[in-house]
Amino acid sequence: MAAHLSISKNLPSAIANQYATSRRAWWPVLLFLPGRFVAALAAQAITAGVFALQGSLNPWHDAAAWWTVYSTMTDILCLAALVFLTRREGMTIVDLIGVPGLWAALRQLAWVFPYLLAVLPTIVAASLVTQLIYGSPVPPIVTIVDLPAPAALYAWLIWPAVWSVTEELVYLGFLLPRIEALTGRVSLAVVVVIFFWGFQHIAIPLIPDGTYLTWRLISSTFAVTGIPVVFVLWGRRLVPLIVLHYLADLATALMATGVLPVS
């Protein structure tokens, strides 16, 4: 019974009721909308600072080559924010996943392939944007990576796992139901989440080039568009989307470090 109550706490209706009865302010939620964008900038700036101290002549560019490593700092900052934001609501980060236990989470794995088929059109659209702008399906975020072996190992083993879980918790577990509760409109909440989710990617990594920034915004927005739509329409199952996100990020890391072919 307690597990089911835990799940219901993260439904938009329960969130709206909680904020209304407690007169809790919405501004922390709204401030968190660009949270991952800001955290990604901070992570790259810290890494660039390290390179600058080591005498790099172009520390920002050198830092960008390590984005599959330093991006875990982005996740740490976002997870810390989620701890604060959920505690003020009397919840935990685990409540954002929306399953009553391990067995329920494992049962959701049966939806991985159907979810893949559902989001595939927007992923293909993102690839076509890359091909159109760069004349190749291989994006700059892959070709810019330049890591020694230990850092590459980190990019394979740690970064995809932490990134996929954190990002899905931020946008689908936390922000989406709260924007729904605030606005009372599912469609508006989905559009808001898609916008900020796509926008954050221009800072992952941030490369000061107009073509790159345009490509990053358009292709990333296409890539994430199907995710919240499928999430809302197909029962709000977060686990299969975390798995798909992990597999996509792992493939990116393997391509960027030369393990998988990029052409």
Image: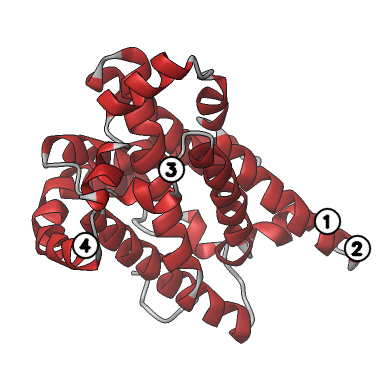
**SS state under label 4:** helix
Residue 194 pos. (x, y %): 35, 32
What number of labels is visible? 4
Identify the residue at horizontal 35%, vertical 48% (top origin): 95
Identify the residue at horizontal 32%, vertical 58% (top origin): 245
Residue tagged 3: 91
Is there a contact, CB below 8 Å, between mark 2 and mark 1?
Answer: yes
Q: CA distance from mark 1 to mark 4?
A: 41 Å
Which mark, by number, is residue 105?
Answer: 4
Residue nearest the observer in this picture, 69 or 121 = 69
Residue tagged 2: 53
Which mark, by number, is residue 49?
Answer: 1
Q: Nearer the viewer, mark 4 or mark 3?
A: 3
Identify the residue at horizontal 25%, vertical 52% (top origin): 3
* Residue furthest to the front: 1
Tell me which amino acid carries mark 1. Answer: Gly
